[in-house]
Amino acid sequence: MYTVIYNEKICLLTGHRSCPELPNIHDGLLLPHDRYIGSVAQYRCLPGYRFEEGGTIRTLICRYGGKWSSEPGHCQGMVRSSQREEPLLDHFLTPI
């Protein structure tokens, strides 16, 4: 059983808190999830994007103590080069 105090769920049996709201990320989706201890949240990059360390899905777990297992991360744009994908560089073109 849970109660809500100051917009935060607290377990009536153990006193443990839920994890905080997760932010949305650019070029990615936060899938519907719970925020209870042990809950799993997933971010997915949009087609053509992936997380900076690779992969298109990032899974976070709400840990005991009310903290997520990692940060959401950032999706980076990809460009196909022959048979492999490479991240797009963040730079601007200057007109001549």
Image (cartoon, helix red, strand yellow):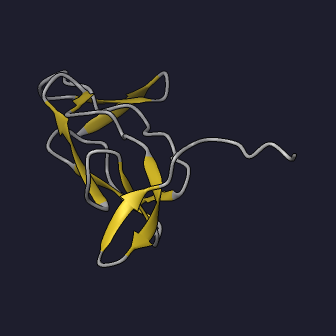
The residue lying at 49 percent from left, 21 percent from top is 6
Q: Where is residue 4 in the image (x, y as percent from the top left)?
A: 40, 31
The residue lying at 42 percent from left, 72 percent from top is 80
Query: Where is 93 relative to 50, above or below?
Result: above
> What quarter of the picture does the N terminus occupy?
top left
Q: In this view, does 25 lie to the left or right of 71?
A: right
Q: Is residue 35 rendered to the left or right of residue 15? A: right
Q: Which residue is drawn at 54% across and 57% down?
A: 27
Task: Left or right? Give the position of 36 relative to 50.
Answer: left
Q: Is residue 3 visible in this depiction of the protein?
A: yes
Nearest to the observer: residue 57 or residue 81: 81
Q: Is residue 87 above or below residue 36?
A: below
Q: Residue at image x 70%, y 42%? A: 92
In depth, the one of 38 and 9 nearer the eye is 38
37 left or right of 4 in image: left
Residue farthest toward the front in the current orientation of the protein: 96
In this figure, what is the number of numbered marks?
0
The reply to whether residue 32 is in sight is no
Q: From the top left corner, tell me how far across and down residue 70 is, in percent.
A: 24, 33
Residue extending furthest toward the right: 96
Q: Which of 32 and 10 is in front in this view?
A: 32
Question: How far across and how far down the image is residue 54, in percent?
Answer: 26, 53
Q: Residue furthest bottom?
A: 83
Residue 59 vs 35, above or below: the answer is: below
Residue 17 or residue 86, whichever sits in front: 86
Q: Residue 33 appears at what percent x and percent y?
A: 34, 56
Q: In which quarter of the image is residue 53?
A: top left
